[in-house]
Protein backbone atom coordinates (compact mmCIF):
# COMPACT_ATOMS: atom_id res chain seq x y z
CA UNK A 1 0.00 0.00 0.00
CA UNK A 2 1.24 3.56 -0.56
CA UNK A 3 2.66 5.57 2.33
CA UNK A 4 2.53 9.28 3.08
CA UNK A 5 5.89 9.48 1.29
CA UNK A 6 4.32 8.29 -1.94
CA UNK A 7 6.43 5.10 -1.96
CA UNK A 8 4.90 1.61 -1.65
CA UNK A 9 5.61 -0.60 1.33
CA UNK A 10 6.41 -4.08 0.15
CA UNK A 11 6.04 -7.22 2.27
CA UNK A 12 4.60 -5.42 5.35
CA UNK A 13 1.40 -6.33 7.13
CA UNK A 14 0.47 -2.71 7.68
CA UNK A 15 1.92 0.74 7.52
CA UNK A 16 0.99 1.34 11.16
CA UNK A 17 3.10 -1.59 12.34
CA UNK A 18 6.10 -0.25 10.46
CA UNK A 19 5.75 3.24 11.95
CA UNK A 20 5.29 1.71 15.39
CA UNK A 21 8.45 -0.31 14.90
CA UNK A 22 10.28 2.79 13.75
CA UNK A 23 9.41 4.85 16.82
CA UNK A 24 10.11 1.92 19.11
CA UNK A 25 13.55 1.72 17.59
CA UNK A 26 14.18 5.42 18.15
CA UNK A 27 13.28 5.19 21.83
CA UNK A 28 15.44 2.13 22.41
CA UNK A 29 18.31 3.49 20.37
CA UNK A 30 18.43 6.69 22.41
CA UNK A 31 18.34 4.70 25.64
CA UNK A 32 20.93 2.09 24.68
CA UNK A 33 23.15 2.92 21.70
CA UNK A 34 25.77 0.20 21.11
CA UNK A 35 29.32 1.14 22.03
CA UNK A 36 31.11 3.03 19.23
CA UNK A 37 34.87 2.65 18.94
CA UNK A 38 37.62 4.39 16.96
CA UNK A 39 39.03 2.20 14.20
CA UNK A 40 42.19 1.04 15.99
CA UNK A 41 40.07 -0.35 18.85
CA UNK A 42 37.30 -1.58 16.56
CA UNK A 43 39.81 -3.56 14.48
CA UNK A 44 41.03 -5.56 17.46
CA UNK A 45 37.65 -6.25 19.05
CA UNK A 46 36.44 -9.86 18.89
CA UNK A 47 33.63 -10.86 16.56
CA UNK A 48 32.78 -11.04 12.88
CA UNK A 49 33.00 -7.70 11.05
CA UNK A 50 29.78 -6.90 9.19
CA UNK A 51 29.52 -4.11 6.61
CA UNK A 52 25.85 -3.08 6.39
CA UNK A 53 26.30 -0.78 3.38
CA UNK A 54 24.78 -1.72 0.03
CA UNK A 55 26.45 -4.39 -2.15
CA UNK A 56 27.83 -1.86 -4.64
CA UNK A 57 29.37 0.21 -1.84
CA UNK A 58 31.01 -2.93 -0.46
CA UNK A 59 32.31 -3.91 -3.91
CA UNK A 60 33.87 -0.48 -4.42
CA UNK A 61 35.91 -0.85 -1.25
CA UNK A 62 35.65 -2.32 2.23
CA UNK A 63 37.72 -3.02 5.32
CA UNK A 64 39.73 -6.18 4.61
CA UNK A 65 38.16 -9.03 6.54
CA UNK A 66 34.68 -7.50 6.59
CA UNK A 67 31.65 -9.40 5.28
CA UNK A 68 28.87 -7.81 3.27
CA UNK A 69 25.70 -7.68 5.41
CA UNK A 70 23.57 -5.07 3.61
CA UNK A 71 20.62 -3.38 5.26
CA UNK A 72 19.43 -2.21 1.81
CA UNK A 73 19.93 -3.49 -1.70
CA UNK A 74 21.39 -1.03 -4.21
CA UNK A 75 17.92 -0.29 -5.55
CA UNK A 76 16.46 0.24 -2.08
CA UNK A 77 19.30 2.56 -1.14
CA UNK A 78 18.66 4.59 -4.30
CA UNK A 79 14.95 4.85 -3.45
CA UNK A 80 15.68 6.07 0.08
CA UNK A 81 18.16 8.60 -1.28
CA UNK A 82 15.64 9.92 -3.80
CA UNK A 83 13.00 10.15 -1.09
CA UNK A 84 15.42 12.09 1.13
CA UNK A 85 16.15 14.62 -1.62
CA UNK A 86 12.50 15.05 -2.60
CA UNK A 87 10.68 14.83 0.73
CA UNK A 88 13.22 15.14 3.55
CA UNK A 89 14.79 13.08 6.27
CA UNK A 90 11.68 11.95 8.13
CA UNK A 91 10.07 10.57 5.00
CA UNK A 92 13.30 8.80 4.01
CA UNK A 93 13.65 7.22 7.45
CA UNK A 94 10.05 6.01 7.30
CA UNK A 95 10.64 4.47 3.90
CA UNK A 96 13.89 2.90 5.05
CA UNK A 97 12.24 1.14 7.95
CA UNK A 98 9.36 0.03 5.74
CA UNK A 99 11.91 -1.68 3.51
CA UNK A 100 14.16 -3.05 6.25
CA UNK A 101 11.54 -4.16 8.78
CA UNK A 102 10.52 -7.39 7.02
CA UNK A 103 14.19 -8.43 6.81
CA UNK A 104 14.97 -8.23 10.52
CA UNK A 105 14.24 -11.90 11.26
CA UNK A 106 16.49 -12.94 8.38
CA UNK A 107 19.24 -10.65 9.67
CA UNK A 108 19.17 -12.46 13.01
CA UNK A 109 19.23 -15.91 11.39
CA UNK A 110 22.13 -15.01 9.10
CA UNK A 111 24.09 -13.36 11.91
CA UNK A 112 23.76 -16.47 14.06
CA UNK A 113 25.30 -18.53 11.26
CA UNK A 114 28.14 -16.05 10.76
CA UNK A 115 28.83 -15.47 14.46
CA UNK A 116 27.75 -18.42 16.64
CA UNK A 117 29.35 -16.68 19.63
CA UNK A 118 26.98 -13.73 19.01
CA UNK A 119 29.75 -11.16 18.95
CA UNK A 120 29.81 -8.85 15.93
CA UNK A 121 31.34 -5.57 14.79
CA UNK A 122 29.17 -3.37 12.59
CA UNK A 123 29.69 -0.34 10.44
CA UNK A 124 28.03 1.61 7.65
CA UNK A 125 29.32 4.63 5.71
CA UNK A 126 29.41 7.25 8.50
CA UNK A 127 28.33 5.32 11.59
CA UNK A 128 24.75 6.50 11.29
CA UNK A 129 21.29 4.99 11.21
CA UNK A 130 22.04 1.99 9.02
CA UNK A 131 24.54 0.49 11.43
CA UNK A 132 22.52 1.57 14.47
CA UNK A 133 19.38 -0.06 13.07
CA UNK A 134 21.09 -3.40 12.47
CA UNK A 135 22.88 -3.16 15.82
CA UNK A 136 19.56 -2.65 17.60
CA UNK A 137 18.02 -5.68 15.89
CA UNK A 138 20.97 -7.91 16.74
CA UNK A 139 21.24 -6.68 20.32
CA UNK A 140 17.55 -7.47 20.78
CA UNK A 141 18.46 -11.01 19.70
CA UNK A 142 21.21 -11.28 22.31
CA UNK A 143 24.26 -10.24 20.28
CA UNK A 144 27.15 -8.24 21.71
CA UNK A 145 27.65 -5.44 19.17
CA UNK A 146 30.49 -2.97 18.62
CA UNK A 147 30.10 -0.07 16.18
CA UNK A 148 32.80 1.74 14.22
CA UNK A 149 32.86 5.39 15.17
CA UNK A 150 32.50 7.41 11.98
CA UNK A 151 31.94 4.27 9.88
CA UNK A 152 33.83 3.29 6.75
CA UNK A 153 34.52 6.96 6.03
CA UNK A 154 36.54 7.16 9.24
CA UNK A 155 38.45 4.02 8.27
CA UNK A 156 39.40 5.62 4.93
CA UNK A 157 40.72 8.65 6.76
CA UNK A 158 42.74 6.38 9.05
CA UNK A 159 44.11 4.52 6.00
CA UNK A 160 45.47 7.64 4.33
CA UNK A 161 47.03 8.74 7.60
CA UNK A 162 49.02 5.49 7.62
CA UNK A 163 50.53 6.25 4.23
CA UNK A 164 51.98 9.50 5.53
CA UNK A 165 54.10 7.62 8.09
CA UNK A 166 57.65 7.18 6.74
CA UNK A 167 59.06 3.67 6.58
CA UNK A 168 62.68 2.53 5.95
CA UNK A 169 61.92 1.17 2.48
CA UNK A 170 64.31 -0.94 0.44
CA UNK A 171 63.30 -1.32 -3.20
CA UNK A 172 63.99 -4.66 -4.86
CA UNK A 173 64.73 -3.84 -8.49
CA UNK A 174 65.73 -5.90 -11.47
CA UNK A 175 64.76 -6.44 -15.08
CA UNK A 176 61.77 -8.52 -16.09
CA UNK A 177 62.34 -12.19 -15.37
CA UNK A 178 64.82 -11.79 -12.50
CA UNK A 179 62.38 -13.46 -10.07
CA UNK A 180 61.75 -10.52 -7.75
CA UNK A 181 58.38 -11.83 -6.55
CA UNK A 182 59.85 -15.16 -5.47
CA UNK A 183 62.74 -13.37 -3.76
CA UNK A 184 60.28 -11.23 -1.81
CA UNK A 185 58.52 -14.39 -0.68
CA UNK A 186 61.85 -15.84 0.44
CA UNK A 187 62.66 -12.66 2.35
CA UNK A 188 59.28 -12.84 4.10
CA UNK A 189 59.86 -16.50 4.95
CA UNK A 190 63.14 -15.50 6.59
CA UNK A 191 61.41 -12.90 8.78
CA UNK A 192 61.86 -9.72 6.76
CA UNK A 193 59.08 -7.14 6.47
CA UNK A 194 57.63 -7.40 2.97
CA UNK A 195 54.64 -5.91 1.18
CA UNK A 196 53.98 -7.67 -2.10
CA UNK A 197 52.11 -4.96 -4.01
CA UNK A 198 51.65 -7.14 -7.08
CA UNK A 199 50.01 -9.88 -5.01
CA UNK A 200 47.60 -7.33 -3.52
CA UNK A 201 46.86 -5.90 -6.98
CA UNK A 202 46.47 -9.34 -8.62
CA UNK A 203 48.77 -8.13 -11.38
CA UNK A 204 52.46 -8.45 -12.26
CA UNK A 205 52.73 -4.95 -13.66
CA UNK A 206 53.15 -5.58 -17.39
CA UNK A 207 51.05 -6.23 -20.45
CA UNK A 208 51.20 -9.90 -19.46
CA UNK A 209 50.65 -9.14 -15.78
CA UNK A 210 47.05 -10.29 -15.37
CA UNK A 211 47.50 -13.71 -16.99
CA UNK A 212 46.52 -16.53 -14.65
CA UNK A 213 45.53 -14.22 -11.79
CA UNK A 214 42.12 -13.34 -10.26
CA UNK A 215 40.34 -10.11 -11.29
CA UNK A 216 41.95 -6.98 -9.90
CA UNK A 217 40.45 -5.18 -6.92
CA UNK A 218 39.43 -1.54 -7.23
CA UNK A 219 42.11 1.02 -6.44
CA UNK A 220 40.16 1.84 -3.29
CA UNK A 221 40.30 -1.75 -2.08
CA UNK A 222 43.97 -1.97 -3.06
CA UNK A 223 44.62 1.08 -0.86
CA UNK A 224 42.68 -0.50 2.01
CA UNK A 225 44.79 -3.66 1.87
CA UNK A 226 48.05 -1.71 1.79
CA UNK A 227 46.94 0.45 4.72
CA UNK A 228 46.38 -2.50 7.07
CA UNK A 229 49.79 -3.94 6.21
CA UNK A 230 51.49 -0.54 6.38
CA UNK A 231 50.15 0.06 9.88
CA UNK A 232 51.67 -3.20 11.15
CA UNK A 233 55.21 -2.44 9.98
CA UNK A 234 57.97 -1.87 12.52
CA UNK A 235 59.42 1.56 11.64
CA UNK A 236 62.81 0.47 12.99
CA UNK A 237 63.22 -2.38 10.49
CA UNK A 238 63.61 -2.38 6.69
CA UNK A 239 60.52 -2.81 4.54
CA UNK A 240 61.01 -4.58 1.21
CA UNK A 241 58.95 -3.52 -1.80
CA UNK A 242 59.35 -4.38 -5.44
CA UNK A 243 60.10 -1.55 -7.86
CA UNK A 244 56.82 -0.59 -9.49
CA UNK A 245 55.30 2.01 -11.76
CA UNK A 246 52.60 4.30 -10.35
CA UNK A 247 49.97 1.89 -11.66
CA UNK A 248 49.96 -1.88 -11.32
CA UNK A 249 47.43 -2.82 -13.95
CA UNK A 250 44.34 -0.82 -13.01
CA UNK A 251 45.41 -0.32 -9.38
CA UNK A 252 47.18 2.88 -8.37
CA UNK A 253 49.77 2.97 -5.59
CA UNK A 254 48.86 5.61 -2.97
CA UNK A 255 50.68 8.84 -3.72
CA UNK A 256 52.40 9.08 -0.33
CA UNK A 257 53.66 5.49 -0.60
CA UNK A 258 54.84 5.94 -4.19
CA UNK A 259 56.75 9.08 -3.21
CA UNK A 260 58.57 7.17 -0.48
CA UNK A 261 59.35 4.36 -2.93
CA UNK A 262 60.82 6.80 -5.46
CA UNK A 263 63.18 8.20 -2.82
CA UNK A 264 64.34 4.83 -1.48
CA UNK A 265 67.55 2.86 -1.88
CA UNK A 266 67.41 0.23 -4.65
CA UNK A 267 68.99 -3.20 -4.63
CA UNK A 268 69.01 -4.41 -8.21
CA UNK A 269 68.89 -8.13 -8.92
CA UNK A 270 70.96 -9.26 -11.93
CA UNK A 271 70.62 -12.68 -13.54
CA UNK A 272 71.83 -14.26 -16.74
CA UNK A 273 69.47 -13.86 -19.69
CA UNK A 274 69.09 -17.64 -19.88
CA UNK A 275 67.82 -17.81 -16.30
CA UNK A 276 65.47 -14.88 -16.90
CA UNK A 277 63.94 -16.55 -19.95
CA UNK A 278 63.54 -19.83 -18.07
CA UNK A 279 61.72 -18.02 -15.24
CA UNK A 280 59.39 -16.26 -17.68
CA UNK A 281 58.50 -19.54 -19.37
CA UNK A 282 57.85 -21.04 -15.95
CA UNK A 283 55.52 -18.17 -14.96
CA UNK A 284 53.63 -17.71 -18.23
CA UNK A 285 53.94 -21.12 -19.86
CA UNK A 286 50.54 -22.24 -18.55
CA UNK A 287 48.74 -19.25 -20.13
CA UNK A 288 46.78 -19.79 -23.31
CA UNK A 289 48.69 -18.96 -26.47
CA UNK A 290 45.85 -16.66 -27.53
CA UNK A 291 46.20 -14.63 -24.31
CA UNK A 292 49.96 -14.41 -24.79
CA UNK A 293 49.52 -13.16 -28.34
CA UNK A 294 46.95 -10.57 -27.27
CA UNK A 295 49.30 -9.34 -24.54
CA UNK A 296 52.11 -9.09 -27.08
CA UNK A 297 49.94 -7.09 -29.49
CA UNK A 298 49.21 -4.57 -26.72
CA UNK A 299 52.84 -3.45 -26.76
CA UNK A 300 53.16 -3.38 -30.59
CA UNK A 301 53.82 0.37 -30.74
CA UNK A 302 56.70 0.09 -28.28
CA UNK A 303 58.05 -3.27 -29.37
CA UNK A 304 57.84 -2.47 -33.08
CA UNK A 305 55.75 -4.04 -35.79
CA UNK A 306 58.37 -6.51 -37.03
CA UNK A 307 59.39 -7.75 -33.60
CA UNK A 308 55.75 -8.05 -32.57
CA UNK A 309 54.94 -10.16 -35.61
CA UNK A 310 57.98 -12.35 -35.03
CA UNK A 311 57.08 -12.81 -31.35
CA UNK A 312 53.47 -13.72 -32.19
CA UNK A 313 54.63 -16.30 -34.73
CA UNK A 314 57.02 -17.82 -32.19
CA UNK A 315 54.18 -18.06 -29.65
CA UNK A 316 52.04 -19.80 -32.28
CA UNK A 317 54.91 -22.25 -32.75
CA UNK A 318 55.04 -22.75 -28.96
CA UNK A 319 58.60 -21.43 -28.88
CA UNK A 320 58.09 -19.26 -25.81
CA UNK A 321 61.77 -18.90 -24.98
CA UNK A 322 62.52 -17.25 -28.32
CA UNK A 323 59.35 -15.15 -28.15
CA UNK A 324 60.19 -13.81 -24.70
CA UNK A 325 63.75 -13.15 -25.85
CA UNK A 326 62.37 -10.67 -28.39
CA UNK A 327 59.89 -9.14 -25.95
CA UNK A 328 62.55 -8.60 -23.27
CA UNK A 329 64.20 -5.93 -25.41
CA UNK A 330 61.24 -3.62 -24.84
CA UNK A 331 60.94 -4.34 -21.13
CA UNK A 332 64.70 -3.93 -20.56
CA UNK A 333 64.64 -0.49 -22.17
CA UNK A 334 61.64 0.51 -20.06
CA UNK A 335 63.29 -0.69 -16.86
CA UNK A 336 66.57 1.10 -17.61
CA UNK A 337 64.74 4.37 -18.29
CA UNK A 338 62.76 4.11 -15.05
CA UNK A 339 65.87 3.30 -13.02
CA UNK A 340 67.70 6.35 -14.38
CA UNK A 341 64.67 8.55 -13.69
CA UNK A 342 64.68 7.70 -9.99
CA UNK A 343 68.14 9.21 -9.37
CA UNK A 344 68.71 7.28 -6.13
CA UNK A 345 71.51 4.95 -4.97
CA UNK A 346 71.46 1.60 -6.78
CA UNK A 347 73.41 -1.46 -5.67
CA UNK A 348 73.52 -4.33 -8.14
CA UNK A 349 73.69 -7.89 -6.84
CA UNK A 350 74.54 -10.73 -9.21
CA UNK A 351 72.50 -13.81 -8.30
CA UNK A 352 72.88 -16.15 -11.25
CA UNK A 353 72.92 -19.73 -10.02
CA UNK A 354 71.55 -18.97 -6.56
CA UNK A 355 68.31 -20.24 -5.04
CA UNK A 356 65.67 -17.80 -3.81
CA UNK A 357 66.57 -18.60 -0.20
CA UNK A 358 70.27 -17.98 -0.84
CA UNK A 359 69.45 -14.69 -2.55
CA UNK A 360 67.30 -13.61 0.40
CA UNK A 361 70.17 -14.38 2.80
CA UNK A 362 72.60 -12.42 0.63
CA UNK A 363 70.28 -9.40 0.47
CA UNK A 364 69.74 -9.40 4.22
CA UNK A 365 73.49 -9.45 4.75
CA UNK A 366 73.87 -6.37 2.57
CA UNK A 367 71.11 -4.48 4.34
CA UNK A 368 72.07 -5.46 7.87
CA UNK A 369 75.83 -5.18 7.33
CA UNK A 370 76.75 -8.80 8.01
CA UNK A 371 78.57 -11.36 5.93
CA UNK A 372 76.46 -13.85 4.03
CA UNK A 373 77.49 -17.53 4.24
CA UNK A 374 76.71 -18.29 0.61
CA UNK A 375 78.73 -20.41 -1.75
CA UNK A 376 78.32 -18.53 -5.03
CA UNK A 377 77.44 -20.83 -7.91
CA UNK A 378 78.29 -18.46 -10.76
Image (cartoon, helix red, strand yellow):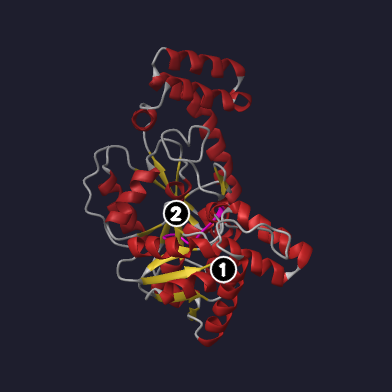
Can residue 185 be found in the magenta stretch? Answer: no
Q: Residues within 10 Å of mark 2 (few under 14, many from 20)?
A: many
| Label 2 SS | strand
Quadrant into which the C terminus falls: top left
Residue corresponding to mark 1: 130
What residue did someone put label 2 on? 241
Left-right relation of 88 to 93: right
Where the N terminus falls, by quadrant?
bottom right
344 horizontally vs 174: left or right: right
Q: Quadrant of residue 111?
A: bottom left
Q: Is residue 328 left or right of residue 367?
A: right
Residue 284: x and y in percent read 39, 29
Number of the label disc, if any, that sits on residue 173: none
Of label 2 and label 1, which has the lower sequence position? 1
Spot occupied by residue 45 in the image (x, y as percentages of width and height)? 38, 75
Above or below: residue 126 compared with residue 218? below
Q: What main secondary structure does the magenta stretch of the protein show?
A: loop
Give the number of the mark in front: 2 or 1: 1
Q: Residue at x 58, y 69 (%)?
A: 18
Determine contact: label 2, label 1, CB under 8 Å: no
Badge 1 crowding class, 10 Å Cα cut-off, few under 14, some 14 to 19, many 20 or more, is many
Q: Is residue 344 visible?
A: no
Up-down relation of residue 56 to residue 33 (above or below): above
The front one of 90 and 231 is 90
Residue bounds of the magenta highlight:
60-65
| Magenta residue check for 61 | yes
Residue 112 spot, x, y in % from top left: 35, 65
Residue at mark 2 to residue at mark 1: CA–CA distance: 39 Å
Amino acid sequence: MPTSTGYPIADCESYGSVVSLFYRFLLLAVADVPHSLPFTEFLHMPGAMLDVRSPSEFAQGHIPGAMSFPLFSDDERAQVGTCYKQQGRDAAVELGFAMAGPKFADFITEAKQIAPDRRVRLHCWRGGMRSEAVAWVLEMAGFKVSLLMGGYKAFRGWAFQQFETPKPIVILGGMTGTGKTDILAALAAQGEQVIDLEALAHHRGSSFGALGLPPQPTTEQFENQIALQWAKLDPQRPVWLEAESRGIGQCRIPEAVFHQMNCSHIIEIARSRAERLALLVQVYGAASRVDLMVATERIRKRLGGLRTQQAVELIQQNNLTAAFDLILDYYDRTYTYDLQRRNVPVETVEVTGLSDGEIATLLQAKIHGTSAPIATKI
